[in-house]
Amino acid sequence: MNVNEIRKNFPILSDPKYIYFDNAATSQRPLQVINAVRDFYENMNANPLRGLYEWSVKATDAYEEARSRVAEHFGIKDEGELIFVRNASEALNLVAYSYGMENVREGDEIVVSIMEHHSNILPWQMVCDKKGATLKYLECDDEGLISDKELEEKIGKKTKIVALGQVSNVLGVSNPVKKAAAKVHANGGIIVVDGAQGAPHQATDVKELDADFYAFSGHKMLGPMGIGGLYGRRKLLEEMQPFLRGGEMIEYVTRHSATYAELPHKFEAGTVNASDANGLKAAVEFLDELGFETIEEQEKKITKILLQRMKEMDHVHVYGSSDPEKHSGIVTFNIDGCHPHDIASVLDGEHIAVRAGHHCAQPLMEFMQERFGMEYRATARASVYFYNTEEEAQRFCDALSKVRGWLGYGA
């Protein structure tokens, strides 16, 4: 892979002064995606699914073609099983409200991991609170790995739902989704997979994962902000009530009742985000053309440099595995005496973008503080993608080695 040639597709990366290492928060967009969104507004801007005139028909066709292409990307054979939403958070809330609130009963258990993003904790806290169920946590070891023993002890006959991130947004580790799925299915429950961090970095077939529901955000995988998706097994989706009600999700309405549209439109109330769906189609085409083997290979190269050099730095502590292959491009760290916000601010002065704080994973931060004696309940995070270079990794490490000195702590 010629990274410099690939970068020419990304206008925002044209100035080599800037290093963007906050890809776990959102990725950058290639021209193909930007142009796809522009093409919609310039050539077919009309309300899809409603008008019988040419522009509306073109908009409708573009929207459904996007669904078909994105479904193919995730191994979804039945396009009715792919619902477009704003992002993974909305997808997870849809499942919590439309499935969880209808199927969880008092005494049931919902199991999540301690590493979950708040978007995959708060909806299940709500369901447990409203229905009298118990929320249980799968805990991880020092490398972020969830053991078979933990799955065996926490997922049992009372488990109605397992909600598990495909990849941790803090430690970068891939979670044992298939093992958890097998365990919960054996007990009659379902598994909900948060794919927000997995979809950008790993080839994902939802059927092969054995997921009942799979949520993802387009903006983390080269797509526009404001578009994402939820895969759900047809049998489950057909039994669920709509999360939102309004235009386009109905078949027939009377003064006192309504019948709902067929899948997936039953869950897509109101004017749909056809322009960004068109952009998401371009994003998955870009990823598929590049290939996930190529993507993972480049990320591992960068991650290896980061881990090797940061290991050599006094006062720098990296969390998670020492194996670059277990980070999915995410390296989370702290520096003795330095608040993560100060680290990020100093690096910004060198035109390097990293994330600092609790990363919407406060239960994990509390767990890590207790486990590792972290000075603050927060960390800094460098997250890379395939368009980052080895030179950028070296420049980042050069700057990082000087942070303590710049903050007045000496070398």
Image (cartoon, rainbow, N blue to C red):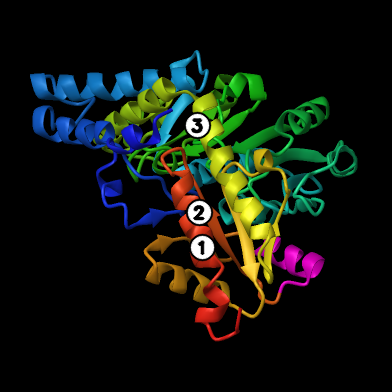
Question: Looking at the image, can residue 311 be seen?
Answer: yes
Residue 136, position as x, y percentages in the image: 79, 51
Q: Secondary structure at mark 2?
A: helix
- Mark 1 or 3, closer to the camera: 1
| Above or below: residue 147 compared with residue 403 | above
Residue at (74%, 54%) from the top-left corner? 132
- Image quadrant assignment for residue 80: top left
Q: Is residue 365 magenta?
A: yes
To which residue does mark 1 refer?
Answer: 398
Name the disc covering residue 42, or none: none
Q: Is residue 183 left or right of residue 313?
A: right
Residue 106, position as x, y percentages in the image: 77, 48
Name the disc covering residue 394, or none: 2
Quadrant of the drawing holding the C terminus: bottom right
Q: Amino acid at mark 1?
A: Asp
Question: Looking at the image, can residue 253 be seen?
Answer: no
Q: Are marks 2 and 1 in contact (CB under 8 Å)?
A: yes
Distance between mark 2 and mark 3 Cα atoms: 19 Å
Q: Amino acid at mark 2?
A: Gln
Residue at (17%, 20%) from the top-left corner? 58
Q: Secondary structure at mark 3?
A: helix
To which residue does mark 3 refer?
Answer: 295
Distance between mark 2 and mark 1 Cα atoms: 6 Å
Q: Residues within 10 Å of mark 3 (few under 14, many from 20)?
A: many
Residue found farthest to the bottom: 408
Residue 199, position as x, y percentages in the image: 52, 34
* First along the sequence among labels 2 and 3: 3
Q: Is residue 74 left or right of residue 155?
A: left
| Above or below: residue 315 compared with residue 216 | below
Q: Amino acid at mark 3?
A: Ile
What stretch of residues is rendered in magenta? 362-374
* First along the sequence among labels 1 and 3: 3
